[in-house]
Amino acid sequence: MGTSNDLLLSYYGDDFTGSTDVMESLTRAGLRTVMFIDPPTAEQLRKYEALRAVGLAGSSRTMSPRQMDVQLTEAFGKLAALGAPIVHYKMCSTFDSSPQVGSIGRAIDIGMKVFGSKVTALLVGAPILGRYCAFGNLFARSGLDSEPCRLDRHPTMRHHPTTPMDEADLRIHLGKQTARKIGLFDVLALELPTEAAEAKFHSLLDAGNEIVLFDVLYDEHLPAIGRLMWKQMTPGRTLFLVGSSGVEYALTAHMNSLGMLPAPRPLGADAIERLVVVSGSCSPVTDRQLAWFLERGAGEIPLKTDRLVDPACREAEIESSVQEALRLLGSGHSVVLPTCRGPQDPRLAATVARLEALGQDAKLRSAEILGRALGDILMRILDRSKLRRAAVTGGDTSTFVARQMGIEALEMLAPLAPGAPLCTAHAPGTSMHGLEIVFKGGQNGKTDFFGAVMSPGRN
């Protein structure tokens, strides 16, 4: 694989929507960023002029440690070959993980081995997303309209169907996934003068900490964190960082303080009259957003997920859903096709039961099976209706939706809500090329999110 001396940063996202989140933060800072579904070839990279950052939309949040050993080792190796001085393992800002599924600790172990790192910085909080870390404990809003909740009391994350979060202290939670020593650069240290802050950071390294977790409460904390990260770069070595898109917000805040960033390009898109939404999210935030959209005239087609996961009836369920969607669109309505409406939806249990009866591991297979089905449904609707804008919800399913639709890469088109930009799809040689699409994580956005998708505006 060829390299590019213009690249500043490359990243691997542990799920699809989190990967678009990083793309947004870098693009809005003026750094052209393209996010790929698979590691890009040198030929692919040559299509994009003035490229400063490359993303790889992964799915490690749903992987077992054994799967991560194979797939992350390969992915990190390919990112290293791109030659960017900084590589970021982007994990979900709600830190949902466990020793068995989506282990952030295992990802850190793999990355530090591949890149030869003795220490890595960990930044999880991102104030723009409503994520805050104080004395090592993570707090998160449930959508941008709510007050922050400690993670183990969060209305969604404590009930996550795959990785329920029962511990808010990230050092304790991460300590179950890796044997590496974890130090904390707390919120009090962030208030120190520059030289004292650097001395504090180095004291954590001198104490043998291999992972340094940063607190963050305010945007004003980001330049100091970015400066400490930036100063760890060494010529000829890759700086391996771990965290949410807070990593990029911190780095670009520091770069901006030094006048290193170019002027951002204009972003925006025109309003549309009808929208197709396929939803794989079980979040109550997404449920409120769907309810808002339905109350304003969109039509709902509740997908029968126990049929979608069963090969014997999958095709019939897909086609009947597509036909009903086309009927609603033809009558002038937007359309919503959800696999779930909130964490108590009875379809969840029914789908798990059907998968288990078929001999499938529901935790490891449901996202892929349902995601590919949603991709089929969406592609057929778009091809037959000729609509050119769509929305997908659900971080665990989005990567499989994109793969099923033949999307090669995404580039930000317009801001909608922090972490969920409207994008242009690059899918050369297919009908999906040039499609305007947003992939939204379950927790992202305000209640009127789908209204923003239909009328993004311009800046």
Image: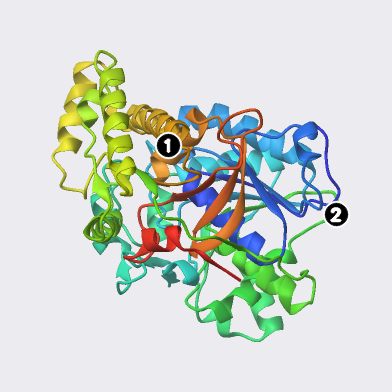
- State whether residue 371 is above or below residue 257: above
Give coordinates of residue 456: x percent, y percent: 49, 63
Give coordinates of residue 194: x percent, y percent: 69, 82
- Give the alpha-carbon distance from disc 1 to disc 2, as whole Å: 53 Å
Kind of residue indicated by mark 2: Pro
Kind of residue indicated by mark 1: Ser
Q: Nearer the viewer, residue 46 or 163?
A: 46
Q: Nearer the viewer, residue 351 or 327?
A: 327
User: Going 77% across and 45% down the picture, which residue do you hit?
Assistant: 48
**What is the basis of the colouring in this image?**
rainbow
Which tag, 1 or 2, sits closer to the chain's start?
Answer: 2
- Front tag of 1 and 2: 1
Displayed quadrant of residue 116:
top right
Give coordinates of residue 106: x percent, y percent: 50, 40
- State whether residue 6 is above or below residue 102: below
Give coordinates of residue 420: x percent, y percent: 48, 57
User: Going 72% across and 56% down the picture, which residue do you hit?
Assistant: 32
- State whether residue 186 is above or below residue 45: below
**With 128 as the anchor, is 151 left or right in this view?**
left
Image quadrant in which the N terminus is located: top right
User: Going 84% across and 52% down the picture, which residue do you hit?
Assistant: 6
**With 82 as the anchor, is 144 left or right in this view?**
left
For numbered disc 2, what is the local secondary structure? loop
Q: Which mark is residue 235?
A: 2
- State whether residue 170 is above or below residue 200: above
Which residue was labeled with disc 1? 385
For numbered disc 1, what is the local secondary structure? helix
Q: Which residue is farthest left? A: 346
